[in-house]
């Protein structure tokens, strides 16, 4: 039973629903201050995951190649296009709330939380770990952060935030179901490097959510796909 996956998706749905419903009723100082806290929390989680790194050259190479792949296939632009397509019917059903009218500002924040919810190292590792061991504590801990993050960002972005629970659930449940196939083929070094790669992306996500630097984090996601094979090859051929 994927308890952690279900709870994590529900936390985004309920948090987004409550945040969008309350909207301007939440004081502006809270709506502006808490995203900074969420950004710092994402950075802290990222740093803790980076410290688990085993093979630095393999992780760095994966990030470079993964980012190049993401830029070439315009992954972030694809997410922005999907967000634009979803936003219009959502806003026809529910009036837009908050003060995020600028399209560029909207997309920067939306893509940031999509990556945070759907492709964080914590979420991916948590789903794989639950699938293999039945331990859902990692995803439950992530659910607390996701609930409040979805709620606060929904006050500015509106009801579209709660729709993120759909791709999030699909990604995490696929990882949960495939865990029994993936993890037996990995080594502790591969898992450590994968975790560290996710941590670097989470660190960049924190900078983006805080409004410090808009890293193209969605374009970095292919690194998560290639980091384990590169780590394995590096250890086999170079070390």
Image: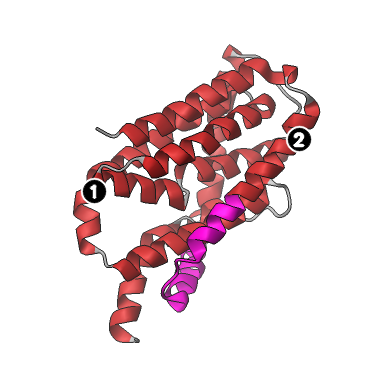
Q: Image quarter for residue 105?
A: top right
Residue 108 visible at all: no
Image coordinates for residue 118, horizontal then vertical, percent: 46, 42
Magenta-drawn stretch, dominant element (helix, strand or loop): helix
Q: Give me the residue at 59% from left, 35% from top.
A: 149
Q: Give me the residue at 65% from left, 40% from top.
A: 109
Number of residues whose C-alpha sits closer than 10 Å to that of mark 1, classed few (under 14), some (14–19) or many (20 or more): some
**In this view, 222 is above or below 59:** above
Task: Label 2: state its secondary structure.
Answer: helix
Q: Could you tell me how far apart the alpha carbons at marks 1 and 2 are, in whole angstroms? A: 39 Å
Q: Give me the residue at 31% from left, 49% from top.
A: 129
**In this view, 152 is above or below 41:** above
**Are the two marked residues, 1 and 2, in contact with CB atoms closer than 8 angstroms?**
no
> Total of numbered circles in the picture?
2
Image coordinates for residue 28, horizontal then vertical, percent: 79, 27
Which residue is labeled 2 in the image?
A: 32
**190 left or right of 8?**
left
Which residue is labeled 1 in the image?
A: 132
Quadrant for the C terminus, please: bottom left
Range of residues picked out in magenta: 42-71
**180 left or right of 50?**
left
Image coordinates for residue 218, horizontal then vertical, percent: 53, 51
Q: Image quarter for residue 23?
A: top right
**In this view, 37 is above or below 215:** above
Say if the magenta span includes residue 211: no
* Residue 213 or residue 68, whichever sits in front: 213
């Amino acid at each position: 039973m994927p308890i952690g996956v279900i709870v994590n998706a529900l936390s985004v749905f309920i948090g987004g629903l409550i945040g969008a419903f309350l909207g301007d009723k939440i004081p502006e100082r809270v709506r502006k201050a808490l995203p900074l806290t969420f950004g710092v929390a994402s950075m802290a989680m990222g740093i803790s995951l980076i410290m688990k790194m085993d093979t630095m050259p393999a992780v760095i190479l994966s990030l470079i190649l993964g980012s190049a792949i993401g830029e070439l296939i315009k992954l972030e632009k694809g997410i922005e296009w999907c967000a634009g397509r979803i936003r219009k019917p959502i806003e026809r059903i529910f009036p837009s709330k908050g003060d995020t009218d600028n399209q560029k500002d909207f997309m920067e924040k939306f893509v940031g939380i999509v990556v945070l919810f759907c492709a964080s190292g914590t979420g991916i590792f948590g789903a794989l770990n639950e699938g293999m061991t039945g331990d859902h504590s990692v995803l439950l801990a992530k659910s607390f952060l996701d609930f409040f993050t979805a709620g606060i960002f929904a006050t500015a972005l509106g009801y579209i935030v709660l729709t993120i629970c759909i791709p999030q659930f699909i990604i995490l449940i696929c990882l949960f179901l495939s865990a029994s196939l993936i993890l037996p083929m990995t080594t502790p070094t591969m898992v450590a490097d994968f975790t560290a790669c996710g941590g670097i992306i989470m660190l960049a996500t924190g900078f983006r959510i805080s409004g410090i630097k808009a890293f193209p984090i969605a374009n970095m996601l292919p690194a998560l796909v290639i980091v384990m094979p590169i780590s394995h090859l590096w250890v086999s051929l170079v070390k």
